[in-house]
Image (cartoon, rainbow, N blue to C red):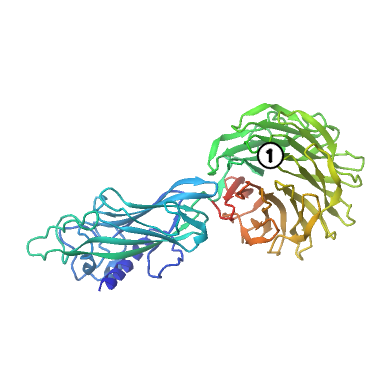
Amino acid sequence: MQNSVFNSLLKALKPAFSALSLALVACQAPANLPQISAKADAPLSISVQTTAPSSAHPSAQASPKQSEAAGPQSASKTNLLPAALLKQLPTQVASIKLQSDRSSFTAVGQQAKLSLSLLDAEGKEVPSTAALRWSSSHPERIAVASTGALSATLSALSAAGPAEISVQLEGTELKTSINIAVVAPVVESSSSGGGGGGGGGGGSAAAADPGTPAAVAPTTESLNASVSFENLGRGEFNINTFTTASQVAPEVAMQSNGNFVVVWESHIQDGAIRGVYAQRFDPQGLPLGSEFRVNTTTANDQYEPAVAMDSAGNFVVAWTSTNQDGSGAGIYAQRYNAAGVAQGSEFRVNVTTAGGQYNPAIGLDGTGNFVIAYTCDGLDGGGNGVEAVRFDASGQVLGSFQANTTATGDQSRPSIGMNSSGQFVISWDSNGQDGDGSGIYAQRYSADGSAQGSEFRVNTQITGAQSRSSLDLSADGRFVVSWESSGQDGSDTGVYAQRYAADGSAQGLEFRVNTTSANSQSDPSIAMDSQGNFVVTWISDGQDGSGAGIYAQRYNASGVAQGAEFQVNTKTSSAQLYPKIDMLANGAFTIVWQSQGSDGNNNGIVGKRFSAQGHAL
């Protein structure tokens, strides 16, 4: 009889949850359980009306179907439970409240709190006892903070407050369930008042009205409710505060403690055409202060920002500035301490001022020394070349050099990977050097700026164009270069990569990164942790069902893909473009990109944080 009674309860509660306009999500729980889809961008508080309090329970003629059809209207008007079931609950219980609250975030997970309460008609808790049990269909993504076990039971629902369980969570696909065992007096018929059971179910039974049977012994029954949490972390979040016109071309850099900074170019915000702006964030992805303008000079255009950050949180931003150096475009930079305070003034980077200098890239070591490379018009007498300048932590120039040895054709669009020891590699596009279109070339350097070996070709496939390289180094000097390749995967452009040992020797063959090859996959960005694990992110045209989307793939240090490629962007309407990534030593990473319409006004900058296991935070 008890099972049928509680099956009726579950059946009666289900429309109550549904009517709250919360999506039903398939869970690894019995199909007849009420289910909640919760997004904890804000605390979730759900009250499920079970019965309207009155001097007498509803007529025993009220059927489950009648109750179910009535729906979860106000408690004073609608009774959701059949009269036979009402005998099984304390007479003053009007609703059951399930609640989830975020309590804190870390770079690798979040803390959340779940609670259950039995409430009377005034919303006050009814003294009873209950047990909450936590489980998950993704056990690898959950740890119960209080015990470290996969599941735990807490008996805490009493006059002192609701039962609670705190857990550390990762990911946007966590499925959880709460099994509630309610210990309460069972009465054979209704009464006009009286209290429920005490803290352990041992409280006195409700006082009976004259002519009603006395209360029988307490019993324990289970009420099961299934809760599905999606996007428990911040998930995808807007970065720019100023939303007029467009904000585009983001870059991101991370500190060892999880703080990070994002830079971008913003149209008309500084009163001219384009300016460079930045926003700092804490390890939980929450803003540190307000967004700020990086460039001091606002005349003409400041655009194409690049950023790098050291382990202490000091960072350097570089950008292209039109006509500031007196001859076309030049490269300028600004240093900041870990608190985001500018150190000195903005300064010119480029040694050569004739023609134009653009496409800056930055590498920063563990002590604040940095290298800025850029494309330089007419540098080597044969078109564009790649020039680089080394600086110490105080911004003093240590020297400059030309990265490319081959001067024929154009060498452009440099990328830099630098580790904490100061070793660095510069890669670039070289037009015509590999015999067919553009190819990817690179040069290794020691911490003092000495070239290690000769420049070398990265791409094995030479048919078509290989361009837009991105690279990063591990702590021991291993590195990976990624690029886009035209026609190699059989359908427009695809994303490829090549691993290297610290001595510059290729490890294995170049490999395709994107699994989906329909349409175009392009503009890769790569980041590597201290152990050599790495993540590549890119633009994929049409894969998310609406324009371009952002995708990524994780790899271990041996170059073995970890799981499948995954969609980064949550918003799929319109175009998501130009992703950039940075990674902590422990493998946690952040991806930022340009999103059309995300801030309500043309293009904006958005981001998403991930744990080392690839779960969105």
Classify residue 378 as left or right of residue 32.
right
Q: Residue furthest left?
A: 210
Q: Residue shown at 21%/54% (left/top)? A: 198
What amino acid type is highlighted by mark number 1?
Answer: Val
Q: Could you say where residue 164 lies in the image, as x and y percent from the top left?
A: 36, 52
Q: Residue at x 86, y 55 (%)?
A: 437
Using the image as rendered, state which of residue 508 and residue 43 is in the foreground.
508
Nearest to the observer: residue 354 or residue 112: 112
**How many C-alpha atoms fall within 10 Å of the one at disc 1: few (<14), some, or many (≥20)?**
many
Residue receiving disc 1: 307
Q: Is 431 drawn above or below residue 224 in the view shown?
A: above
Q: Nearer the viewer, residue 592 or 220?
A: 220
Q: Is residue 74 visible?
A: no
Residue drawn at (71%, 31%) of the image: 393
Q: Secondary structure at mark 1?
A: strand
Q: Relative to 141, is 499 on the left or the right? A: right
Residue situated furthest top in the rendering: 344
Residue 454 x %, y %:
87, 47
Is residue 612 toward the left or the right of residue 160 in the image?
Answer: right
Quarter of the image where one finds residue 306: top right
Q: Position of residue 249 (x, y in %)?
A: 68, 44
Q: Quadrant of residue 423?
A: top right
